[in-house]
């Protein structure tokens, strides 16, 4: 497996509106998502146990890292009591005793890292990503279809988006695009560690190390 840092440009006006926002991304090459199986399942069992011992439903929303994502959601017009940040939603699901979601081995492993660290993450198939990645405002009238959505959204120009040079990859940091998602045939992926104001870049770097640890352990 090859690991290579990927630069994400943050639009200056966006950085001015959200001081402290940052993104960390890296490319994983040489993936074989047909592997893992029992190793991934053992990691799921291990991390689920750790999460259940670390959090409680009653105080989850007040954990500082989840609070930072919630506060960002409010600022971009999303009610986090209805659309929870993905890391918090994963932890809440575990605490409620529900089955950990299985998507594909890569997604499962970065979801484990997200539950472990509280940091929201995403991944995109390299073969479906074109050119420079940027965190920007959307452009009014742009079209976006998220994973599992039947219809496209028409963006209003006020959404925060992660994009390449051809299309919007996500409405940041909560909804990824259908066209660039990973699946079991993915050979190379860009993993994005999603920062918001109040989440230090060092926290994103620690989350990257956890992702790499889990991917190496789960996929070999």
Image (cartoon, helix red, strand yellow):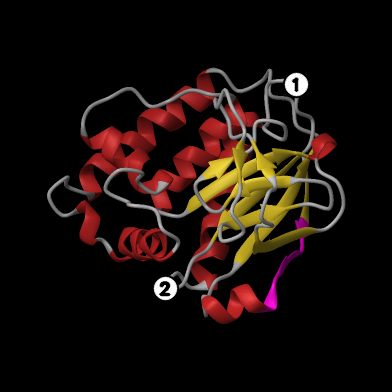
**Which of 153 and 197 lies nearest the eye of the viewer?**
153
- On the rendered structure, is 78 left or right of 136? left
User: Residue 11 lies in magenta, yes or no?
Assistant: yes
Label 1 sits on a secondary structure element that is loop
Q: Residue at x 65, y 40 (%)?
A: 144
Q: Tell me: 86 left or right of 49.
A: right
Q: Quadrant of the C terminus?
A: top right
Q: Residue at x 37, y 28 (%)?
A: 45
Q: Residue 147 in magenta? A: no
Q: Which residue in the protein does label 1 denote?
A: 185
| Residue 180 at x, y percent in the picture | 72, 35
Q: Residue at x 67, y 64 (%)?
A: 136
Bounds of the magenta segment: 5-12
Place of residue 57 in the rendered image (x, y in percent of width and height, measured from the top left) = 17, 45
For residue 169, side relative to residue 96 (left or right): right
Which of pointers 1 and 2 lies earlier in the amino acid sequence?
1
Name above or below for residue 125 compared with residue 150: below
């Amino acid at each position: 497996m090859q690991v290579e840092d990927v630069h994400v440009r943050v639009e200056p006006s966006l950085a001015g509106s959200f001081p402290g926002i940052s993104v960390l991304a890296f490319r994983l090459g040489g993936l074989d998502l047909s592997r893992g199986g029992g190793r991934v399942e053992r990691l799921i069992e291990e991390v689920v146990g750790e999460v259940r011992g670390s959090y409680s439903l009653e105080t989850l929303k007040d954990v500082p890292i989840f609070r930072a994502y919630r506060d960002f959601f409010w600022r971009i017009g999303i009610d986090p009591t209805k659309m929870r940040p993905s890391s918090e939603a994963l932890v809440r699901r575990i605490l409620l005793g529900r089955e950990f979601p299985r998507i594909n081995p890569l997604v499962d492993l970065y979801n484990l890292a997200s539950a472990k660290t509280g940091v929201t993450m995403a991944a995109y198939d390299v073969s479906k990503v074109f050119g420079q990645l940027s965190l920007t405002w959307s452009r009014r009238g742009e079209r976006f279809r998220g994973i599992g959505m039947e219809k496209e959204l028409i963006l209003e120009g006020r959404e925060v988006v992660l994009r390449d040079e051809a299309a919007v990859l996500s409405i940041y940091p909560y909804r990824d695009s259908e066209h660039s998602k990973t699946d079991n045939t993915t050979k190379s992926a860009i993993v994005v560690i999603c920062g918001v104001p109040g989440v230090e870049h060092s926290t994103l770097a620690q989350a990257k190390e956890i992702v790499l640890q889990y991917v190496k352990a789960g996929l070999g």
